[in-house]
């Protein structure tokens, strides 16, 4: 199963289980660190309905460029000369279209 954020197929199995289905593994992406489940079929089987998903990008393009250049956080301070409201709005919009933002909020109901 590939990572929801970066689509990497490289992951590690983490300790822990899903209470309702012990066959589901808890995985962590080796590339971006996202923790996710090996299957979400149990949500559908529970009769739950996905109402909406909102993609939000909390970290700016400056932060990501600094990570690429230096391999550590702090880009919002060191590379802040490129941060503009318009640029980051467009950046978030593009990441949301690709469904690869750093934060996802979902509404699920019965
Ligand atoms: Zn990833």
Image (cartoon, grey):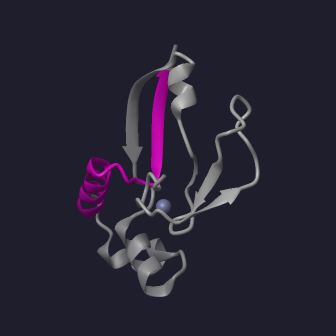
Where does residue 66 sit, x and y in percent of width and height? Answer: 43, 79
The answer to which image quadrant residue 92 occupies is: bottom left
Left or right for 67, reference 89? right
Looking at the rendered structure, the number of numbered marks drawn on it comes to: 0
28, above or below 51, in the image: below
Place residue 20 in its image quadrant.
top right
50 drawn magenta: no
- Image x and y of residue 53, in percent: 39, 34
Residue range in magenta is: 86-108
Name the foreground residue: 13 vs 62.
13
Residue that appears at 25% across and 55% down: 94
Relative placement, left or right, of 12 versus 16 is left
Tell whether position 99 is magenta. Answer: yes
39 in relation to 75, above or below: above
Residue sticking out furthest to the bottom: 70
In terms of depth relative to the viewer, which is nearer, 40 or 62? 40
What residue lies at 42% left-to-right and 85% top-to-bottom? 69
Residue 86: where, in percent of width, then height?
23, 59
85 shown above or below 64: above
For image coordinates 65% across by 47% down, the residue present is 25
Query: Which residue is depicted at the point 44% across and 51% down?
Result: 4
């Amino acid at each position: 199963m590939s990572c929801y954020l970066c689509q990497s197929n490289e992951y590690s199995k983490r300790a822990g289980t899903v209470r309702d289905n012990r066959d589901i593994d808890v995985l962590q992406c080796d590339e971006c660190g996202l923790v996710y489940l090996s299957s979400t079929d149990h949500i559908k089987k529970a009769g739950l309905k996905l109402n909406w998903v909102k993609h939000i990008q909390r970290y700016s393009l400056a932060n990501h460029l600094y990570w690429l250049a230096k391999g550590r956080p702090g880009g919002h301070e060191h590379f802040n000369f490129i941060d503009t409201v318009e640029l980051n709005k467009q950046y978030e919009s593009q990441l949301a279209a690709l469904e690869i933002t750093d934060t996802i909020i979902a509404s699920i109901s019965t």
